[in-house]
């Protein structure tokens, strides 16, 4: 059984109605429990929980410090390519957008790696548009061969791959994979993924199962907040996490919170989440699962990140560039996937985090320590 089969047993509209029917009493019951279930999570993300935000935040801080200590991990994305063979309504890399396409060669890749290393990063997130023919396994083999010895942690955010491909990349140095379902509503998913392999909802949603079977050390989940009603989508993320942890208990998990941002194509989100609601969601995930890593990227504003990082976030990006070649040559903004909102340098972010009483972690993982085979 995969999560796809479990998803077919979940009725989107029933879940949405259940979330919006939660009362203050439901929220209070959830807050009084030490171990929460999915019904409690519904209460914590419901409108009824909004007056309890301060209480949720205090509990989130407590749980985060208990589990992760006074630390925040730093990572940075390295964009390999903006080539894409999909048409997606919301993405700047979408095949129908008339932008200049490029893919880093190995010389350019090493120039990027050198610039990133100079900033102090050890955790590298490799990102590319989904173009299996031009940016597929042959290319990834070259990339990992070049980078494995340079960074202590290599993450991947590209098109979903087969289990055998993940097993091979693990041997080449892959540590973690981020694969966002975008939306868990099949009809909405079909509306926004018009052409290309990404239109295969089932193959994408079963990717974490393939990762678990391949023994990947960590996987990242998330919904693209704004494609559909955010509370219902984010409940499905929690349900997906719950399913995966019960089956692949040796794997570590992270959740990200990408809110739609301006990009080429001028897509308008269906659902708008305000800042207080995002804080509510972050705290709800922390209370639901004290062990899950929570990540916040430079999509969010400096002011928002300054206030939210201490509440439950365990990893952040800093100094991010969202175009291929952006670290060694930051002149071609036209290649960006989306606009970042927090453009502070890694050094500035490190100084800020220290003023919060938190320690910056540049390296928290060494492949030689893994026990997964």
Image (cartoon, grey):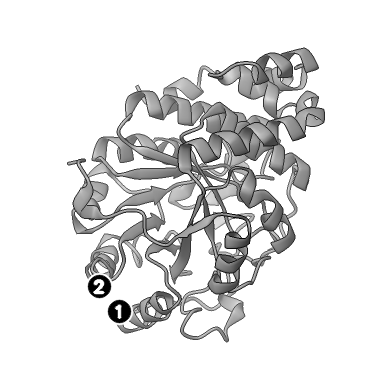
Judge whether residue 136 can be spotted in this image. Answer: yes
Front position in the image: 299 or 143: 299
Residue 280: quadrant of the picture? top right
Secondary structure beneath dot 1 equals helix
Residue 134: quadrant of the picture? bottom left
Secondary structure beneath dot 2 equals helix
Instruction: Tell whether label 2 touches label 1 (CB within 8 Å).
Output: yes
* Vertical order, 22 against 338 (above or below): above
> Mark 2, residues whose alpha carbon is within 10 Å: few (<14), some, or many (≥20)?
some
* Vertical order, 92 against 55 (above or below): below
> Mark 1, residues whose alpha carbon is within 10 Å: few (<14), some, or many (≥20)?
some
**Disc 2: which residue:** 146
Residue 290 as seen in the image, left or right of residue 372: right
Q: Quadrant of the N terminus?
A: top left
Question: From the viewer's perspective, is the residue at label 1 or at label 2 nearer?
Answer: 2
Q: Quadrant of the C terminus?
A: top left
Return the x and y of residue 108 as percentages of the image width and height.
37, 82
Please name the residue shown 59% across and 60% down the image: 353
**Disc 1: which residue:** 106
Front position in the image: 302 or 356: 356
């Amino acid at each position: 059984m995969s999560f796809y089969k479990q998803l077919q047993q979940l009725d989107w509209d029933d879940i949405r109605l259940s979330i919006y029917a939660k009362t203050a009493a439901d929220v209070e019951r959830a807050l009084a429990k030490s171990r929460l279930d999915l019904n409690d999570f519904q209460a914590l993300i419901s409108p009824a929980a909004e007056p309890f935000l301060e209480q949720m935040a205090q509990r989130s801080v407590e749980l985060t410090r208990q589990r992760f200590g006074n630390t925040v991990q730093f990572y940075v994305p390295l964009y390999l390519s903006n080539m894409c063979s999909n048409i997606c309504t919301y993405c700047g890399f979408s095949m129908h957008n008339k932008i200049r396409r490029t893919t880093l060669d190995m010389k350019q890749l090493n120039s990027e790696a050198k610039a990133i290393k100079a900033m102090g990063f050890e955790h590298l997130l490799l990102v590319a548009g989904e173009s299996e023919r031009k940016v597929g396994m042959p290319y990834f083999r070259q990339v990992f061969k070049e980078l494995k010895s340079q960074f202590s942690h290599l993450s991947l955010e590209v098109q979903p791959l087969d289990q055998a491909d993940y097993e091979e990349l693990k041997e080449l140095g892959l540590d973690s994979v981020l694969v966002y379902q975008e939306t868990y509503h099949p009809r909405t998913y079909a509306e926004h993924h018009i052409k290309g392999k990404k239109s295969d909802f089932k193959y994408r949603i079963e990717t974490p199962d393939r990762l678990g079977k391949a023994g990947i050390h960590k996987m990242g989940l998330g919904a693209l907040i704004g494609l559909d009603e955010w509370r219902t989508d984010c409940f499905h993320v929690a349900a997906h996490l719950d399913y995966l942890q019960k089956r692949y208990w040796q794997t570590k998990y992270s959740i990200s919170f990408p809110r739609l941002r301006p990009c080429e194509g001028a897509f308008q989100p269906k659902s708008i989440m305000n800042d207080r609601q995002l804080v509510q969601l972050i705290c709800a995930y922390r209370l639901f699962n004290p062990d899950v890593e929570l990540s916040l990227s430079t999509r969010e504003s400096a002011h928002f990140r300054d206030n939210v990082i201490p509440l439950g976030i365990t990893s952040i990006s800093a100094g991010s560039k969202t175009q291929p070649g952006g670290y060694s040559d930051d002149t071609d903004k036209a290649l960006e996937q989306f606009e970042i909102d927090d453009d502070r340098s890694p050094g500035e972010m490190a100084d800020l985090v220290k003023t919060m009483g938190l320690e910056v972690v540049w390296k928290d993982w060494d492949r030689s320590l893994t026990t997964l085979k």
